[in-house]
Image: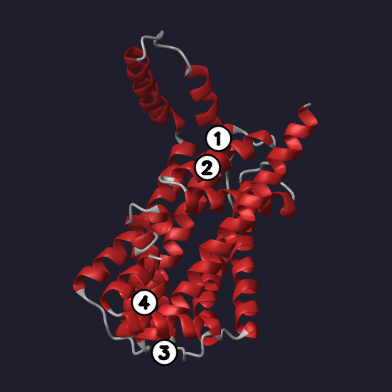
Amino acid sequence: MGAVVAAAVSHPSTVVATLHALASVHPGWLAAAVAVEAVSVLAIAQQHRVMLGAAGAQRPRVGDYLAVTYVGGAVSSSLPGGPALAAAYTYRQLRSRGVTEAHAVWTLAVSGAVSTAVIALTSTTLLTLAGRPTPTTLTLGAVEIAAAPTLVALAGWAARHPQPLLRLASTVLGRLNRLRRRPAGTGRDRVVATVLTLNDIQPRWRHWAAALGCAAVNWGADAACLALCLLAVGAAIPSLAAIVLAYVAGVATTELALTPSGLGMTEAAITAALVAHGSPAHPALAAVLLFRLVSPGLNTAIGAMIGLTRRSAASTTGR
């Protein structure tokens, strides 16, 4: 909506043209955009389930965990500090389903690292193929790509050599307990049990392949939603590289923005990237607004409805 306000102040005709494009959306392309976005959310849920299986934990049912994913997405998109709150919510949901503390933390951390690696690799590759690489973008991309497997390798090393990690965790815990004026050993048994559990997590190559595939489907389906929104407003898709680069610009802006889900800034970033790659301004803005209504708008609405329904059911059961 921030993009609309800015356009209304500087160029009122832009708003008129954008609203006209939105009023004549092609229902078939819009339905396809909604469908691929549902696939994107399902891929996130399945990636977590794959990692839980790799850890040897009991995996929630697909439908049940898909609902958890939608609610977590709604929290992430609608509240300040949403990603952290969403991670905490997902963690609590996993724990309530019998997943151990170590398995839940490992699943969320490694899933995030794998997803980051996939989008970093994709964006850097397309920057190179599109002939628009710069030393800065290539360096940042290389760092991002290297960071994820490095973190995974460190986690694997820590799992095989728990004693150094235990010493570090005990030192940190002791200082925290001192600040909180608690006995130095408070919580140490819990930390020891969590670290030792990591030693049992030994993912196989098929787990990594499945997790990478789910991450690729997640990002790819979300980017495809943007492309379909362009078609829905009657605009042409400039190129595959343009779609992915515009999408990555939106993802990066969302991560850096202070507003929930990057509201205002993300729309402007994606629109500017599309226009820079040849899309007309009015249809590009209309497509981006439509895309954001679907992702995260529709996802947030679905997650909110699921969350309210489950809370109501829990309240009724508790009476």
Residue designated by label 3: 238
Tell me the distance, in whole angstroms, between the alpha carbons under discs 2 and 3: 40 Å
Percent x, y for residue 55?
61, 44
Question: Along the polypeptide, which appears first: circle 4 or circle 3?
Answer: 3
Q: Amino acid at mark 2?
A: Trp
Point 64% across, 48% down: residue: 68
Crowdedness near tag 3: few (<14), some (14–19) or many (≥20) residues, C-alpha within 10 Å: some
Q: Nearer the viewer, residue 23 or 252?
A: 23
Q: How many marks?
A: 4
Q: Quadrant of residue 113?
A: bottom left
Point 32% across, 18% down: residue: 175
Image mark for residue 102: 1
243 left or right, relative to 9: right
Crowdedness near tag 2: few (<14), some (14–19) or many (≥20) residues, C-alpha within 10 Å: some
Residue designated by label 4: 271
Question: Along the polypeptide, which appears first: circle 3 or circle 1?
Answer: 1
Q: Secondary structure at mark 2?
A: helix
Question: Along the polypeptide, which appears first: circle 4 or circle 1?
Answer: 1
Whether residue 255 is situated above or below residue 92 in the rendered picture: below
Q: Secondary structure at mark 1?
A: helix
Tell me the distance, in whole angstroms, between the alpha carbons under discs 2 and 1: 6 Å
Q: Are marks 2 and 1 in contact (CB under 8 Å)?
A: yes
Q: Secondary structure at mark 3?
A: loop
